[in-house]
Image: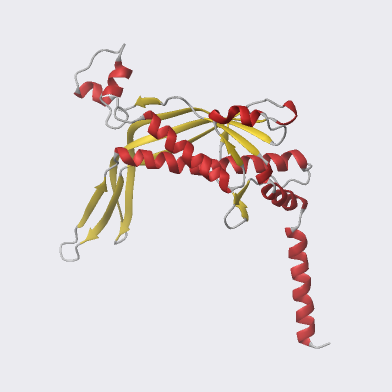
Amino acid sequence: MTQSIKATKILILIFLIIGLYSCSPEKKLAIEFASKAKSNSILILAPNQLFKVNLKTFMLDSLGIKDDKNKDSLLLIHSHYLSELNDSLFIANYILGYAKSLSKFGFRIYNQSQMEQFLGIDSNTYQINIAQIELEETLYTYRDEANVVDSYYYHDHNLNAVYVNSWFEISNLDKGNSKQNIYFSSDLITDIPEGAFDYDIFSGRVRYMYNIDSLELNMLYDFAYQLGSEYAKYTFDLLLNEELDNKIDASQRNNKYWRYDPTRRTFFLAKDDRFIPLDE
């Protein structure tokens, strides 16, 4: 047997091993779940309003406000972003991003106005209630740092920031199962700093030069859409991993949390990009 034939057989054996591994029960089930998403229907319920909190309490001193009883409402009135934010527009963008992204996985999407039509479906149904969305306006300290000529330099920026906190109630309605599991996620949008440390070889001094692209109100509406789109992916991944947990024996489950890209049709591992369960 020639060396080339031996090499060919070894390569074939390697591919067979890879093929067997890729066709593990876990992956087969994951592929099956993704392929059958189009047979599932999801009802999305949206909140009626936002909860808004201004955490910039230092403003009370600068404004000379001593009224602790009404401090929360006063802080909100004097907030830079939240006082002007349109709740309906923010929620609409959030839900639009969420629904459009979920539909890319193949799900049939229903909203509250289609409740009667949704209730006529007798199987493969989920209800997702975005129970609460909270916005917190605050300052966020960002440190820009670098090593220049073997010395450490840094500059701290106090950036305007808004946290968006979301609570999801997710129910699998099949077989009369109405149990709601609650999940949480939080993301942050800030001013965008661009800075650089410059070393002057003649004077030996290091200067820090920077520019800040300020956070604007309209960016929050775009951010709402982006969050909805991303959390739709979290939702699919959650349902996928629950399917694996329910149908694969614990001894065979590898305890990895899988994510799925519907465009590339590929699976990959999640890190912190997932919902936080609150019912455990």
Quadrant where the C terminus lies?
top right
Q: Which of 228 and 275 lies nearest the eye of the viewer?
A: 228
Seen as rendered, the residue at the extreme right is: 1
Badge count:
0
Q: Is residue 139 above or below residue 27?
A: above
Name the image quarter holding residue 60. top left
Residue at 75%, 63% in the rendered image: 19
Q: Answer with left or right where residue 67 lies relative to residue 102.
A: left
Residue at 32%, 49% in the rendered image: 144
Q: Which of 1 and 52 lies nearest the eye of the viewer?
A: 52
Give the colour scheme of this rendering.
secondary structure
- Residue 58, image x and y in percent? 26, 25
Q: Answer with left or right where residue 267 lies relative to residue 48.
A: right
- Residue 6, image x and y in percent? 79, 82
Q: Answer with left or right where residue 114 lies relative to residue 28.
A: left
Name the image quarter holding residue 163. top left
- Residue 129 can be seen, yes or no: no
- Residue 23, image x and y in percent? 76, 57
Q: Is residue 93 above or below residue 269?
A: above
Seen as rendered, the residue at the extreme bottom is: 2
Q: Is residue 195 above or below residue 172?
A: below
Quadrant where the N terminus lies?
bottom right
Residue at 40%, 30% in the rendered image: 88
- Residue 61, image x and y in percent? 22, 21
- Residue 222 can be seen, yes or no: yes
Residue at 24%, 14% in the rendered image: 66
Q: Answer with left or right where residue 121 lies relative to residue 54.
A: right
